[in-house]
Amino acid sequence: MDKEFRECLIITGIICLCTGLFSMAYHMGWLAQDSSLLGTLARSIYGPDVRQEMNRLQLVKETTPEIPRITALCYHEVRPDRKEDFLNVPPEVFRRHIQEFKKAGYKFIDVSDLQQFRMGTAELPEKAVLISFDDGYADNYTYAYPILLEEQVPGTFFVVSGTVGHDNRMTADELREMQANGMKIGSHTVSHENLAEMGVQSINFEMRESRAALEKVLGKPVYALAYPEGKANDAVLASVKKHYDMAFLAEVSPEEKQTMYTLQRYGVFSWNEHIESIFRNR
Protein backbone atom coordinates (compact mmCIF):
# COMPACT_ATOMS: atom_id res chain seq x y z
CA MET A 1 0.00 0.00 0.00
CA ASP A 2 1.37 3.41 -0.95
CA LYS A 3 2.66 5.43 2.01
CA GLU A 4 0.72 8.56 1.01
CA PHE A 5 -2.45 6.49 0.67
CA ARG A 6 -1.97 5.05 4.18
CA GLU A 7 -1.44 8.53 5.60
CA CYS A 8 -4.60 9.71 3.87
CA LEU A 9 -6.55 6.82 5.37
CA ILE A 10 -5.21 7.61 8.84
CA ILE A 11 -6.08 11.29 8.52
CA THR A 12 -9.55 10.44 7.22
CA GLY A 13 -10.04 8.01 10.10
CA ILE A 14 -9.00 10.65 12.64
CA ILE A 15 -11.38 13.19 11.09
CA CYS A 16 -14.24 10.69 11.16
CA LEU A 17 -13.48 9.78 14.75
CA CYS A 18 -13.36 13.43 15.85
CA THR A 19 -16.56 14.18 13.96
CA GLY A 20 -18.27 11.22 15.62
CA LEU A 21 -17.07 12.24 19.08
CA PHE A 22 -18.19 15.83 18.47
CA SER A 23 -21.63 14.68 17.33
CA MET A 24 -21.93 12.35 20.34
CA ALA A 25 -20.91 15.15 22.72
CA TYR A 26 -23.57 17.43 21.24
CA HIS A 27 -26.33 14.84 21.43
CA MET A 28 -25.35 14.05 25.01
CA GLY A 29 -25.74 17.75 25.85
CA TRP A 30 -22.09 18.19 26.83
CA LEU A 31 -21.53 21.18 24.53
CA ALA A 32 -24.33 23.43 25.79
CA GLN A 33 -21.88 25.82 27.42
CA ASP A 34 -21.69 29.52 26.55
CA SER A 35 -17.95 30.03 26.75
CA SER A 36 -16.48 26.87 25.23
CA LEU A 37 -15.04 26.86 21.72
CA LEU A 38 -16.72 23.54 20.98
CA GLY A 39 -20.01 24.93 22.29
CA THR A 40 -19.75 27.85 19.88
CA LEU A 41 -18.99 25.46 17.02
CA ALA A 42 -21.94 23.24 17.96
CA ARG A 43 -24.24 26.26 18.06
CA SER A 44 -23.12 27.36 14.60
CA ILE A 45 -23.73 23.87 13.18
CA TYR A 46 -26.84 22.70 15.04
CA GLY A 47 -28.32 25.99 16.26
CA PRO A 48 -29.15 26.79 19.90
CA ASP A 49 -29.58 23.69 22.05
CA VAL A 50 -33.07 23.90 23.56
CA ARG A 51 -33.59 20.19 24.24
CA GLN A 52 -33.40 20.63 28.01
CA GLU A 53 -36.17 23.21 27.89
CA MET A 54 -38.33 21.10 25.58
CA ASN A 55 -38.02 18.21 28.06
CA ARG A 56 -39.17 20.51 30.87
CA LEU A 57 -42.15 21.66 28.82
CA GLN A 58 -43.10 18.08 28.07
CA LEU A 59 -43.19 17.49 31.83
CA VAL A 60 -45.47 20.54 32.21
CA LYS A 61 -47.78 19.11 29.56
CA GLU A 62 -47.95 15.76 31.33
CA THR A 63 -48.48 17.08 34.87
CA THR A 64 -50.63 20.19 34.25
CA PRO A 65 -52.06 20.03 30.70
CA GLU A 66 -54.42 22.94 31.40
CA ILE A 67 -51.49 25.33 31.92
CA PRO A 68 -49.94 27.13 28.93
CA ARG A 69 -46.81 25.30 27.82
CA ILE A 70 -44.46 28.25 27.41
CA THR A 71 -40.94 29.45 28.04
CA ALA A 72 -41.23 32.71 30.00
CA LEU A 73 -38.28 35.03 30.64
CA CYS A 74 -37.83 37.72 33.29
CA TYR A 75 -35.43 40.55 32.47
CA HIS A 76 -34.81 43.62 34.60
CA GLU A 77 -32.31 46.05 33.10
CA VAL A 78 -31.06 46.31 29.51
CA ARG A 79 -28.33 48.92 29.21
CA PRO A 80 -24.78 49.19 27.82
CA ASP A 81 -23.14 50.25 31.09
CA ARG A 82 -23.38 48.75 34.60
CA LYS A 83 -21.69 45.56 33.44
CA GLU A 84 -21.05 44.63 37.07
CA ASP A 85 -24.80 44.57 37.80
CA PHE A 86 -25.99 40.96 37.67
CA LEU A 87 -29.53 42.09 36.79
CA ASN A 88 -28.31 43.96 33.71
CA VAL A 89 -28.22 42.36 30.25
CA PRO A 90 -26.38 44.47 27.65
CA PRO A 91 -28.48 45.47 24.61
CA GLU A 92 -26.39 43.42 22.17
CA VAL A 93 -26.84 40.31 24.32
CA PHE A 94 -30.58 40.95 24.61
CA ARG A 95 -30.82 41.13 20.81
CA ARG A 96 -28.73 37.94 20.55
CA HIS A 97 -31.18 36.13 22.83
CA ILE A 98 -34.08 37.13 20.57
CA GLN A 99 -32.25 36.04 17.44
CA GLU A 100 -31.25 32.72 18.97
CA PHE A 101 -34.85 31.98 19.97
CA LYS A 102 -35.89 32.76 16.40
CA LYS A 103 -33.18 30.44 15.07
CA ALA A 104 -34.42 27.71 17.42
CA GLY A 105 -37.91 27.98 15.92
CA TYR A 106 -39.66 29.82 18.76
CA LYS A 107 -42.63 32.15 18.29
CA PHE A 108 -42.96 35.18 20.56
CA ILE A 109 -46.10 35.80 22.60
CA ASP A 110 -47.30 38.21 25.28
CA VAL A 111 -49.85 38.11 28.08
CA SER A 112 -52.73 38.83 25.70
CA ASP A 113 -52.01 35.50 23.99
CA LEU A 114 -52.13 33.80 27.39
CA GLN A 115 -55.42 35.55 28.09
CA GLN A 116 -56.91 34.18 24.87
CA PHE A 117 -55.58 30.72 25.73
CA ARG A 118 -57.12 30.98 29.19
CA MET A 119 -60.48 31.92 27.68
CA GLY A 120 -60.29 29.11 25.15
CA THR A 121 -60.38 31.43 22.13
CA ALA A 122 -56.89 30.71 20.76
CA GLU A 123 -54.13 28.13 20.83
CA LEU A 124 -50.48 28.84 21.55
CA PRO A 125 -47.56 28.01 19.26
CA GLU A 126 -45.78 24.72 19.90
CA LYS A 127 -42.60 26.60 20.87
CA ALA A 128 -43.77 29.80 22.55
CA VAL A 129 -41.55 32.26 24.40
CA LEU A 130 -42.72 35.24 26.44
CA ILE A 131 -40.30 38.10 27.11
CA SER A 132 -41.11 40.11 30.21
CA PHE A 133 -39.45 42.84 32.26
CA ASP A 134 -39.87 43.61 35.95
CA ASP A 135 -39.73 46.93 37.82
CA GLY A 136 -40.25 49.45 34.98
CA TYR A 137 -36.69 50.75 34.66
CA ALA A 138 -36.13 53.68 32.27
CA ASP A 139 -33.67 51.64 30.21
CA ASN A 140 -36.51 49.30 29.25
CA TYR A 141 -37.87 52.15 27.13
CA THR A 142 -34.50 53.51 26.00
CA TYR A 143 -32.80 50.25 24.98
CA ALA A 144 -35.06 47.18 25.15
CA TYR A 145 -38.17 48.65 23.53
CA PRO A 146 -36.40 49.79 20.30
CA ILE A 147 -34.84 46.33 19.92
CA LEU A 148 -38.23 44.67 20.35
CA LEU A 149 -39.67 46.94 17.66
CA GLU A 150 -36.79 46.27 15.28
CA GLU A 151 -37.02 42.52 15.81
CA GLN A 152 -40.86 42.66 15.60
CA VAL A 153 -41.21 40.94 18.96
CA PRO A 154 -43.82 41.73 21.64
CA GLY A 155 -42.78 42.45 25.21
CA THR A 156 -44.65 42.46 28.53
CA PHE A 157 -43.57 45.03 31.12
CA PHE A 158 -44.53 44.59 34.77
CA VAL A 159 -44.51 48.07 36.28
CA VAL A 160 -44.51 49.27 39.89
CA SER A 161 -47.39 51.75 39.79
CA GLY A 162 -46.07 53.85 42.69
CA THR A 163 -42.79 54.60 40.89
CA VAL A 164 -44.06 55.53 37.41
CA GLY A 165 -42.27 58.73 36.39
CA HIS A 166 -39.75 58.54 39.23
CA ASP A 167 -35.99 58.71 38.73
CA ASN A 168 -34.74 55.86 36.52
CA ARG A 169 -38.30 54.65 35.89
CA MET A 170 -40.50 54.82 32.80
CA THR A 171 -43.01 57.63 32.53
CA ALA A 172 -46.75 57.42 31.88
CA ASP A 173 -46.26 58.81 28.35
CA GLU A 174 -43.63 56.17 27.60
CA LEU A 175 -45.91 53.39 28.83
CA ARG A 176 -48.74 54.67 26.66
CA GLU A 177 -46.46 54.86 23.62
CA MET A 178 -45.22 51.33 24.18
CA GLN A 179 -48.76 50.04 24.58
CA ALA A 180 -49.81 51.79 21.36
CA ASN A 181 -46.99 49.94 19.57
CA GLY A 182 -47.98 46.47 20.70
CA MET A 183 -46.29 46.13 24.07
CA LYS A 184 -48.28 44.91 27.07
CA ILE A 185 -48.20 46.41 30.55
CA GLY A 186 -48.82 44.44 33.74
CA SER A 187 -48.72 45.14 37.45
CA HIS A 188 -45.76 44.72 39.78
CA THR A 189 -47.80 46.11 42.73
CA VAL A 190 -47.77 49.63 44.18
CA SER A 191 -44.58 49.57 46.24
CA HIS A 192 -42.58 46.50 45.15
CA GLU A 193 -42.56 45.20 48.73
CA ASN A 194 -42.59 41.46 49.41
CA LEU A 195 -46.28 40.53 49.47
CA ALA A 196 -45.60 37.32 51.39
CA GLU A 197 -44.53 39.40 54.41
CA MET A 198 -47.72 41.54 54.47
CA GLY A 199 -51.08 41.23 56.14
CA VAL A 200 -54.23 40.56 54.13
CA GLN A 201 -55.37 44.20 54.00
CA SER A 202 -52.00 45.38 52.74
CA ILE A 203 -51.86 42.63 50.14
CA ASN A 204 -55.31 43.55 48.84
CA PHE A 205 -54.31 47.23 48.72
CA GLU A 206 -51.19 46.46 46.66
CA MET A 207 -53.17 44.32 44.23
CA ARG A 208 -56.18 46.59 43.87
CA GLU A 209 -54.54 50.00 43.79
CA SER A 210 -51.76 49.05 41.41
CA ARG A 211 -54.24 47.75 38.87
CA ALA A 212 -56.46 50.81 39.23
CA ALA A 213 -53.55 53.24 38.86
CA LEU A 214 -52.16 51.53 35.78
CA GLU A 215 -55.57 51.25 34.13
CA LYS A 216 -56.05 54.99 34.68
CA VAL A 217 -52.73 55.68 32.96
CA LEU A 218 -53.24 53.23 30.11
CA GLY A 219 -56.96 53.36 29.49
CA LYS A 220 -57.06 49.58 29.09
CA PRO A 221 -57.55 46.61 31.43
CA VAL A 222 -54.56 45.30 33.37
CA TYR A 223 -55.03 41.59 34.04
CA ALA A 224 -51.53 40.20 34.69
CA LEU A 225 -49.26 40.58 37.71
CA ALA A 226 -45.67 39.64 38.55
CA TYR A 227 -44.98 39.07 42.24
CA PRO A 228 -42.25 41.31 43.71
CA GLU A 229 -39.20 39.16 44.42
CA GLY A 230 -41.18 36.31 42.89
CA LYS A 231 -42.69 35.49 46.30
CA ALA A 232 -46.25 34.32 46.97
CA ASN A 233 -47.91 32.48 49.86
CA ASP A 234 -51.49 31.30 50.42
CA ALA A 235 -52.75 34.77 51.42
CA VAL A 236 -51.15 36.33 48.33
CA LEU A 237 -52.63 33.67 46.06
CA ALA A 238 -56.09 34.17 47.57
CA SER A 239 -55.89 37.91 46.90
CA VAL A 240 -54.42 37.81 43.40
CA LYS A 241 -57.31 35.69 42.16
CA LYS A 242 -59.71 38.51 43.05
CA HIS A 243 -57.87 41.13 41.03
CA TYR A 244 -56.00 39.46 38.14
CA ASP A 245 -56.40 36.67 35.61
CA MET A 246 -52.81 35.44 35.82
CA ALA A 247 -49.65 35.99 37.82
CA PHE A 248 -45.98 35.16 37.43
CA LEU A 249 -43.19 33.93 39.65
CA ALA A 250 -39.53 34.71 38.95
CA GLU A 251 -38.09 31.22 39.07
CA VAL A 252 -38.48 27.82 37.45
CA SER A 253 -38.99 24.64 39.48
CA PRO A 254 -39.70 21.78 37.05
CA GLU A 255 -40.99 19.53 39.85
CA GLU A 256 -43.59 22.11 40.99
CA LYS A 257 -47.03 22.09 39.40
CA GLN A 258 -48.15 25.45 38.03
CA THR A 259 -51.47 27.27 37.94
CA MET A 260 -52.43 30.45 36.10
CA TYR A 261 -51.35 32.27 39.27
CA THR A 262 -47.97 30.56 39.66
CA LEU A 263 -46.65 30.74 36.11
CA GLN A 264 -42.92 30.20 36.15
CA ARG A 265 -40.32 32.45 34.50
CA TYR A 266 -36.59 32.11 34.06
CA GLY A 267 -34.64 34.99 35.52
CA VAL A 268 -32.18 36.32 32.94
CA PHE A 269 -28.90 37.68 34.26
CA SER A 270 -25.63 39.25 33.17
CA TRP A 271 -23.89 35.89 32.75
CA ASN A 272 -26.45 34.57 30.25
CA GLU A 273 -24.50 35.15 27.04
CA HIS A 274 -26.62 32.63 25.11
CA ILE A 275 -30.06 31.17 25.64
CA GLU A 276 -28.82 27.68 26.63
CA SER A 277 -27.49 29.08 29.88
CA ILE A 278 -30.87 30.69 30.69
CA PHE A 279 -32.40 27.23 30.96
CA ARG A 280 -29.95 26.39 33.76
CA ASN A 281 -31.20 29.27 35.90
CA ARG A 282 -33.50 28.34 38.77
Image: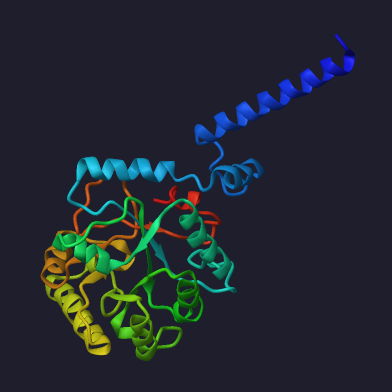
Position of residue 17 relative to residue 44, above or below, is above
Percent position of residue 136, x then y:
38, 78
Asked if residue 65 lies left or right of residue 101, the reply is left
Q: Looking at the image, which is closer to me, 133 or 23?
A: 23
Position of residue 130 relative to residue 257, above or below, is below
Can you say which quadrant of the picture contains the N terminus? top right
Q: Residue at x 17, y 61 (%)?
A: 118
Q: Residue at x 63, y 44 (%)?
A: 41
Colour mapping used in the image: rainbow
Q: Quadrant of residue 60?
A: top left
Tally of numbered discs: 0
Percent position of residue 27, x then y:
51, 33
Q: Quadrant of residue 20?
A: top right
Percent position of residue 229, x then y:
33, 65
Could you tell me if residue 226 is visible in this image?
A: no
Percent position of residue 44, x then y:
60, 47
Q: Looking at the image, which is closer to me, 193 or 210?
A: 210
Q: Looking at the image, which is closer to me, 168 or 173?
A: 173
Could you tell me if residue 3 is visible in this image?
A: yes
Asked if residue 241 lies left or right of residue 222, the reply is left
Asked if residue 56 lies left or right of residue 270, the reply is left
View extreme (right): residue: 3
Position of residue 48 relative to residue 148, above or below, is above
Q: Residue at x 42, y 83 (%)?
A: 169
